[in-house]
Amino acid sequence: MLRLLVLRARTLGRLRAARSVRVGPGVRIDIARGASVVLGPGVVLGAESRITALGGTVVLRAGARLGERAIIVARRRVEIGEHAVVGDWAAVIDVVPLYADVETPVREQPPLTRHVVVGPAAVVGPHAAVYTGVAPGAVVEPYAVV
């Protein structure tokens, strides 16, 4: 709990967290100016997990669980539904590179950002990567790319 208080002080109001949030050792939350992170009641952040809000909002609803070394990266909005689980070493990212022009290097093309939602009670398996969202109650198999 003390660690969460330190995070609140450092993020200057950009982090809103319920009192019942549990934070594992080594968790890192980076919030850029203009971005925000909302952690609902009963949220669990596994050891060494990462949340990076480059812009927009990251929302973890009541009872959501972020596994060990799992990552969330948001430029627009990432939302993890109630009682959803993001497994160990999994990634939820709302930015994907574009390959529209084959003559232009990928690094010079603007990335595509979209609102990504992992629905309530959904499970993202270990080492999976989610770029588009997951339906409520769905299961993403380990090592899958969605």
Image (tube, rainbow, N blue to C red):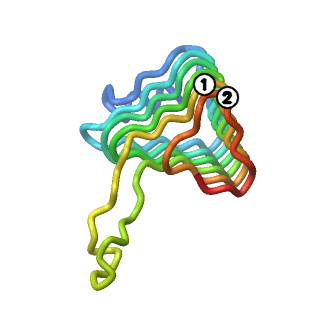
Q: Are marks 1 and 2 in contact (CB under 8 Å)?
A: yes
Query: In this figure, which residue is indicated by the disc labeled 2?
Result: 137
Q: Residue furthest bottom?
A: 103
Q: Earlier in the sequence, mark 1 or mark 2?
A: 1
Mark 2 nearby-residue class (10 Å; few <14, some 14–19, many ≥20) = some
Q: Nearer the viewer, residue 49 or 75?
A: 75
Image position of 136 (left or right of 57): right
Q: Is residue 27 left or right of residue 58?
A: right
Residue at x 58% of width, y 42% of height: 27
Q: 32 left or right of 83?
A: left
Task: Point out residue 139 in the picture as x, y percentages from the top left corner.
Answer: 71, 39
Query: What residue is at 75 percent from the left and 52 percent from the top?
Result: 142
Q: Looking at numbered disc 1 in the image, what kind of residue is underneath it?
A: Pro
| Residue 10 spot, x, y in % from top left | 37, 35
**In the figure, residue 98 lies in which quadrant?**
bottom left
Where is residue 20, by image quadrant? top right
Which mark is on residue 55? none
> Could you tell me which secondary element the residue under label 1 belongs to?
loop
Residue visible at 34% across and 56% down in the picture:
112
Residue 52 coordinates in the image, percent (x, y): 44, 46
Please, is residue 75 above or below residue 105 in the view? Answer: above
Residue denoted by label 1: 120
Query: Dot 2 lies on which element?
Result: loop
Q: Is residue 69 above or below residue 11?
A: below
Q: Quadrant of the N terminus?
A: top right
How would you rate the neighbour count of disc 1 (Cα within 10 Å): few for under 14, some for 14-19, many for 20 or more? many
Mark 1–mark 2 Cα distance, whole angstroms, equals 6 Å
Amino acid type, label 2: Gly
